Image: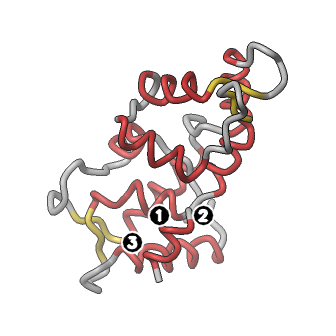
């Protein structure tokens, strides 16, 4: 790929090989989203689907040479959420204009807007990323987002070993 530097291609190859469980030089398209996220590309499920990701395993396999253009294109995409955009959006819920919002409102946002989560997912995100609530039920949403974007989380690091 002309727009990828050699070290980026090698980084992609190393990550790709983690998902190549058979050693055959191909990965299941089901893992495209995970692979892109492992390469620090923030993507939505819709973007993954447009890039060729599948909803079920064993539907389609993809070779490394076919993955590189996907990575290159998705990385350039303006569809990626950035932390600054999310901070700006959460300011709507910052009634006191002090960088805090009700934890219950954040849970509601995660359950109802964008790519909706289910209660179990919200509970997991809160336990991994949410700063402690103050006595009135408010949290610092910037701390929450920075922790969320910093991932992977300690449990995932241990599982990857």
Apparent side of residue 161 relative to residue 134 in the rendered image (left or right):
left
Q: Residues within 10 Å of mark 2 (few under 14, many from 20)?
A: few
Question: What whole-number distance in Å separates the C-alpha atoms at marks 3 and 1?
Answer: 6 Å
Q: From the viewer's perspective, is 77 left or right of 25? A: right
Q: Earlier in the sequence, mark 1 or mark 2?
A: 2
Residue 39 at x, y percent in the picture: 55, 63
Mark 1 and mark 3 in contact (Cβ < 8 Å)? yes
* Residue 119 position within the rendered picture, expressed as x and y whole percent measured from the top left: 37, 35
As helix, strand or loop, the secondary structure at mark 2 comes to: loop
In terms of secondary structure, where does tag 3 sit?
helix
Q: Is residue 22 left or right of residue 106?
A: left
Q: Which residue is mark 2?
A: 2
Give the camera-side residue of 91 and 15.
91
Q: Which mark is residue 68?
A: 1
Q: x%, y% of residue 32?
A: 37, 58
Cβ atoms at labels 1 and 2 below 8 Å apart: no
**Element carrying mark 1:** helix
| Residue at horizontal 64 percent and vertical 24 percent from the top | 102
17 vs 141, left or right, is left
Residue at the farthest front position: 135
Outermost residue to the bottom: 23
Name the residue: 69% across, 33% down: 139
Image quadrant where residue 131 sits: top right
Residue underneath mark 3: 64
Foreground mark, 1 or 2, reads: 1
Q: Which residue is located at x 84 percent, y 24 percent?
A: 98
N-terminal of the pair, mark 2 or mark 3, is: 2
- Labels 2, 3: front one: 3
On screen, residue 3 above or below 123: below
Characterize the local packing of mark 3: few (<14), some (14-19) or many (20 or more) Cα atoms within 10 angstroms: some
Name which residue lies at 49% across and 77% down. 158
């Amino acid at each position: 790929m002309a727009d990828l530097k050699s070290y980026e291609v090698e980084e992609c190859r190393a990550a790709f090989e983690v998902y190549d469980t058979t050693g055959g030089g191909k990965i299941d398209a089901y893992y495209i989203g995970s692979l892109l996220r492992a390469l620090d590309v923030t993507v939505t499920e819709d973007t993954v689907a447009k890039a060729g990701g599948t909803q079920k395993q064993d539907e389609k396999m993809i070779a490394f040479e076919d993955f590189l253009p996907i990575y290159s294109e998705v990385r350039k995409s303006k569809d990626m959420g950035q932390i600054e955009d999310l901070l700006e959006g959460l300011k709507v819920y910052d009634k006191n204009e002090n960088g805090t919002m009700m934890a219950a409102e954040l849970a509601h946002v995660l359950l109802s807007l964008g790519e909706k989560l289910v209660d179990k997912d919200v509970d997991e995100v809160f336990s991994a990323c949410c700063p402690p609530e103050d006595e009135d039920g408010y949290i610092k949403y910037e701390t929450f987002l920075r922790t969320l974007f910093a991932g992977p989380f300690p449990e995932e690091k241990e599982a990857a070993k």
